Amino acid sequence: MSFWARRIGELVIVLFGISLASFLMLHLTGDPAIAILGPDYTEEALVRLRQDLGLDRPLVVQYLDFLGGALRGDFGDSTRYRQPALDLFLERVPATVELTIASLLVSIVFGVTMGVLAAVFRNTGLDTVARATALIGQAIPGFFLGIVAIIIFGAQLKWLPTGGRGTIQHLILPAIALGTYYAAITARFVRGSMLEVLHSDYVRTARAKGLRRATVIIRHSLRNALIGVVTLIGLQLGNLLGGAVVIETVFSWPGVGRLAVQAIYARDFPLVQVIIMIAALIFVVVNLITDLSYRLLDPRIRVGGDA
Amino acid sequence: MARKLVRVFFRDKLAVTGLFIAVLFVILACWPTAWLPANPRSTSPQMRLTPPAWTAAGTMERPLGTDQLGRDILSRVVVGTRVSLSIASLAVLISAVLGIAAGVIAGYFGGLIDSVIMRLVDVQLAFPLLLVIIALVALLGASIPILIVLLGLSGWAQYARLVRAETLAVKEREYVAASLALGNSSFGTIWRHVLPNISSTTIVIGTFELARVLLVESSISFLGLGVQPPTPSWGSMIADGRNYIYQGWWVSTIPGIAIVLAVMSFNFIGDGLRDVLDPKSR
């Protein structure tokens, strides 16, 4: 129980740190009012805008105000759309969640299949092909893979749409572009842990009992090898916005990532601040859930200590 | 001992391939650019979107073709190598110094300072890195020095976490206790006994970080918030070709291949070094 008490305590401290960092990021690197007005501003307009936005108050007061608002779910208004920033964010969430789930499927299906096949057929041609694919997949920037996919499947073969959201066909290319990196990581990870499990005593026992090879691989090896994949899924979910930023821009996908980039181009910093802060919150919460499921799935693991 | 490790490294085919490609990139980046077919910045409208030399419409004067402004892609990729590699290596240097200092202090002294540093690491890792950097670049103005500093500041947390774990292990060794018993100060002990013994870990992290920072920098430049024209960079070259996927597939594809090769070579070297320096991870 003390593990959970401490874990929650840490979570609260980190959440506080996230709010402070997101606040200071905007207020110490420059004057948000100047950022909004652009380089050609008059002194008069600046003073008025600073008063409107409450920027003339002491920094501590501004932060407490920001924190109080955030706790009530009020993250301020977007300067471009003149709407609550949180609403704009929530509007775009379904598109990003859809893309993330699809890319998660890509990474799990391809990653686990390739990893298991590579481990079971170790040191064969299949293993070499799977490992080479994973090594390349890990090195291709998602946006480049996206453009290559657009050139081949969109421009040349004309099989799939190259941008926008709507049908399931629209989802295929962005999901592959976003999921490939994680599929590669998953494949390498699954191959490694499968090899370890395949050489363990209980698998040898199961084989010695006369069980079929496929039964041993699926029932006894895969289940244990997959526990670690939970962490990878957590990592990918936690980082969803990081990857979505570029992929959504490449494929004109109307999600949170594209909203963030457009907000940055439009110098709509209150909106940017909300998106960054909520992304950080999601990351921390997903991490906690990952830890929890890890402990539930594998009773041998004690995630205690300082890890 | 060292010679044996070198031999183990060179037996790893992927690691040697990675090293070969990386050395090639470094030579390309450092070599004087006089041999290049054209000035990477000079445009020529009559040569725009010339395909690479191996295609029917290509010419040896522009071996890798030209972009939408008629600029030579080979020359731009080579100068882009120089830009991207300098940014990545300087940024990794900054995050290494910060991260090693934070990680060693956290691991060696423990207690409150450890908790504070590790919570800072948690906060840093929670933020969507790419989004934070492009937001700050938009605020501070896009320039290469700002990009280097932001990329450098963003990478320390990963370093700190791994260096801390390694320091915890090294701290328990007899030579650290012996050094303290001989009356050496904590900092003297860290300098002479802890740092040398975690150096191999830091080199492995640095290699992977180089690959990661190259990817992040290319994404930022792709979004138009990193390296600014007319300076060529791999990421912005890919962005240039985006509008010409029908007329000129090579404009995006060739700089993209350069990124993939560079990132892959650093990953290969990192994998190889890790196997050599930490046989358990094999």
Image (cartoon, coloured by chain):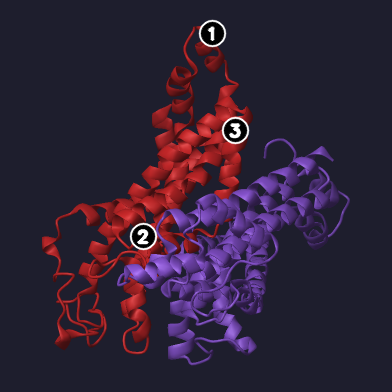
Chain colours: A purple, B red
The three-letter amino acid code for the residue at tag 2 is: Leu
Q: CA distance from mark 1 to mark 2?
A: 50 Å
Q: Which residue is mark 1?
A: B181
User: Which label sits on residue A72?
Assistant: none
Q: Secondary structure at mark 3?
A: helix
Residue A138 visible to an observer of this rendering: yes
Q: Nearer the viewer, residue B117 or B14?
A: B117
Q: Residue at x 51, y 70 (%)?
A: A245
Q: Is residue A19 left or right of residue A229?
A: left
Q: Quadrant of residue B227?
A: bottom left
Chain-order first, disc 3 or disc 1: 3
Which quadrant: the C terminus of chain B? top right
Q: Residue at x 88, y 50 (%)?
A: A209
Tell me which chain the residue with mark 1 is part of: B
Q: Position of residue B82 (x, y in %)?
A: 26, 57
Q: Which residue is mark 2?
A: B140
Q: CA distance from mark 3 to mark 1?
A: 24 Å
Of the two numbered discs 1 and 2 in the rendering, the one whose residue sits closer to the viewer: 2
The three-letter amino acid code for the residue at tag 3 is: Asp
Q: Position of residue A28 (x, y in %)?
A: 44, 53
Q: Residue at x 50, y 74 (%)?
A: A79
